[in-house]
């Protein structure tokens, strides 16, 4: 009788645990898209100032003493002030800040001339997708750590057809309740597996990442870890003010990459439109150069194909007329 009661209680506990896990998964899948929208709205009008460091695999370290990142609607910008790269072989302490700005219409890059302190125009052009992808990588690395890691968003992984949720559980860290998901997915070049800790009380922002990646082409294995911390800027509105990541590989564990970002000042809703114009840096606002007229010598031009078809038809007709004359003769 006692044994039967014990088994019955165990079954009830097991069913309750399964139900609890199922409810947690449903809540995560339901709330997370809304959380992504929230973090997207934060990035539509803000300005953050801090510092950045990145240790490269060759042993050198890039340091930005004053990093400014800002967003206003679809305009994005980062300013790398007092940037240097130092190693045993390199000791570049020159103050060479760079301004990189992207809007839906145009993009520009500036570099400060050290002796004069004036900004020099490096490029001012129509926004192109290839260059924007490189810009977005670093822009995302600086400020989008609440929703993405290792160059891709968690939502992008979830929407991939190969994404598989292995488990989901609650855990406590420093008195805060987090949710850990264990997953695997097969991306274009790598197979990825590991865990991500999310903070439901901070709009499901990423708190930590611990993943393993295997390159499909050569089975090259690497490990990636990341920690993110937040600050409440306004009531109920948080911002990722600290991120530290570490990447190592099995074949060469002594070579690693480590990134650290800290923002000391963050303002929401205060980005100035002038920040995204050349005139803010002492350069007249320039109109975009008119696009070059497309040449007719392109396979996408229907006139070229019509001309080729007409030429072939003429040669064919002349050849037939010549053949008839020969026969007549």
Image: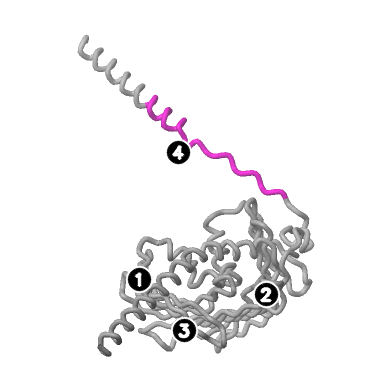
Nearest to N terminus: mark 2 or mark 3:
2
Mark 2 element type: strand
The alpha-carbon separation of the residues under discs 2 and 4 comes to: 44 Å
Residue 322: x percent and y percent? 28, 17
Q: Label 4: which residue?
A: 300
Residue 155 horizontal side relative to residue 183, left or right: right
Q: Label 3: which residue?
A: 256
What is the basis of the colouring in this image? one colour
Q: Is the residue under label 3 in contact with that under label 4 (CB below 8 Å)?
A: no
Q: Label 1: which residue?
A: 191
Mark 4 element type: loop
- Does residue 210 appear anywhere in the picture? yes
Q: Mark 3: give few (<14), some (14-19) or many (20+) Cα within 10 Å.
A: some
Residue at 39 percent across and 72 percent down: it is 19
Nearest to N terminus: mark 2 or mark 1:
2
Looking at the rendering, which quadrant does residue 275 occupy? bottom right
Q: Is the residue under label 1 in contact with that under label 4 (CB below 8 Å)?
A: no
Question: Of residues 177 and 134, which is closer to you in this image?
Answer: 177
Nearest to N terminus: mark 4 or mark 1:
1
Stretch of the chain drawn in magenta: 287-311
- Does residue 96 appear anywhere in the picture? no
Residue 86 horizontal side relative to residue 118, left or right: left
Residue 259: x percent and y percent? 55, 80
Q: Mark 4: give few (<14), some (14-19) or many (20+) Cα within 10 Å.
A: few
């Amino acid at each position: 009788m006692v044994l039967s009661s014990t088994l019955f209680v165990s079954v009830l506990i097991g069913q309750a645990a399964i139900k609890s896990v199922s409810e947690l998964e449903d809540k995560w899948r339901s709330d997370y898209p809304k959380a992504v929208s929230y973090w997207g709205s934060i990035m539509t009008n803000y300005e953050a100032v801090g510092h950045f460091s990145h240790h490269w695999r060759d042993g050198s370290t890039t340091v930005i003493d004053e990093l400014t990142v800002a967003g206003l609607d679809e305009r994005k910008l980062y300013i790398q002030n007092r940037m240097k790269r130092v190693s045993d072989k390199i000791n570049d302490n020159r103050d060479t800040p760079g301004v990189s700005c992207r809007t839906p219409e145009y993009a520009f890059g500036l570099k400060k001339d050290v002796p004069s302190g004036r900004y020099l125009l490096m490029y001012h052009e129509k926004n192109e997708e290839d260059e924007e992808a490189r810009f977005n990588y670093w822009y995302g690395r600086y400020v989008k750590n609440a929703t993405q890691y290792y160059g891709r968003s968690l939502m992008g992984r979830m929407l991939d057809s190969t994404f598989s949720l292995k488990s989901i559980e609650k855990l406590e860290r420093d008195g805060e309740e987090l949710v850990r998901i264990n997953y695997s997915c097969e991306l274009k070049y790598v197979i990825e597996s590991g865990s991500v800790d999310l903070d439901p009380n901070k709009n499901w922002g990423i708190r930590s990442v611990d993943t393993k990646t295997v390159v499909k082409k050569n089975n090259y294995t690497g490990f990636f870890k990341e920690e993110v911390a937040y600050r409440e800027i306004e009531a109920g509105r948080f911002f990722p003010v600290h991120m530290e990541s570490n990447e190592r590989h099995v074949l060469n564990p002594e070579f690693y990459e480590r990134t650290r970002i800290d923002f000391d000042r963050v303002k929401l809703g205060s980005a100035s439109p002038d920040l995204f114009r050349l005139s803010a840096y002492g350069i007249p606002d320039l109109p975009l150069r008119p696009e070059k007229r497309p040449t007719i010598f392109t396979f996408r031009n229907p006139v070229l194909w019509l001309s080729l078809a007409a030429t072939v038809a003429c040669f064919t007709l002349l050849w037939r007329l010549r053949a008839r004359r020969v026969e007549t003769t």
